[in-house]
Image: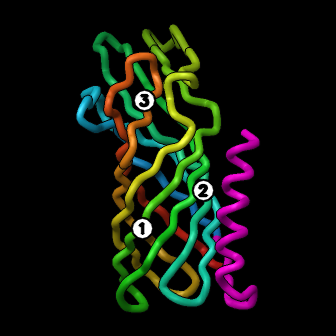
Amino acid sequence: MKRTIVGVAGIVFVMGLASPAHAMKAALKVGVNYADLGGEDDPDMDPSLRYAGGLVFSPTGPFGLEVIYSQKGAQEDLGGGSMYYIEGEYAQATFLARLGGQNARLVLGGYAAFKLGKAREILEGGGMTVTDESIDDDIKDLDFGAVAGLSFGGRQATFDVRYEMGLTSIDDSSSPSDIVNEVITAGVTIRF
């Protein structure tokens, strides 16, 4: 947890050095993730809805930084009312470049997601939680990826839709596979 806080604080500090204080604007972002697992060793699970939200730091110009809480993972319907979930919670720093006009922009960038130590797998059946086990040791502490999407709106509020593709495997088990996070995220940003 300390590494996560120090990492995110370091990113915000460096971003602050790169831009004069008077040019830095802060905003609040909330959204949902349509999250799945993919990669060469795709576990063939179904996407699931997760939450995201946090702060957006935008200096004057086309570049920005988001520091958000983001849930990622996947689910599988086992039939007979039983569901299997894999989920992870991350503190994510996303660096963005916005290209285009004032009201509609192409958004490109990359992210570094720091695991918050709450990766787990859950088996539910018959309306009850059958197992809820930590898989922290099997999920890497860092996840890096690329971001592409569209942003719409004005000075006070924007709506964006993005695709986030993991570039590094998150599997840190004794027999690792190439499994990455894949997320379609939709969010609203409100500027102060």
Q: Distance between the residues labelled 2 and 3?
A: 22 Å
Which comes before the other along the chain, label 1 or label 3? 1
Local secondary structure at mark 3? loop
Q: Is residue 25 magenta?
A: yes
Per the image, is 50 magenta?
no
Q: Give the number of the disc on residue 171.
A: 3
For this rendering, which residue is in front, 38 or 173? 173
- In percent of the image, x 45 and y 27: which residue is there? 86
Residue 139: % across, % down: 50, 29
Structural distance between the alpha carbons of marks 1 and 3: 23 Å
Q: Earlier in the sequence, mark 2 or mark 1?
A: 2
Q: How far from the left and from the top, in percent, is residue 132? A: 56, 15
Residue 109, label in figure: 1
* Viewer-side residue, 61 vs 156: 61
Position above or below: 3 against 153: above
Give the amino acid type for the residue marked by disc 1 in the picture: Gly
Residue named by callout 2: 68
Judge from the rendering whether residue 98 lies leftward or rightward of residue 51; answer left or right. Answer: left
Point out which mark residue 56 bears: none
Judge by depth and name the residue closer to the eye, 27 or 110: 110
Q: Mark 2 Cα within 10 Å, few/some/many (few <14, many 20+)?
A: many
Q: In the rendered image, which quarter contains the C terminus?
A: bottom right
Circle 2: element type = strand
Amino acid type assigned to the residue bearing label 2 in the image? Ile
| Type of the residue with mark 3 | Asp
Mark 2 / mark 3, whichever is N-terminal: 2
Bounds of the magenta segment: 1-27
Q: Residues within 10 Å of mark 1 (few under 14, many from 20)?
A: some
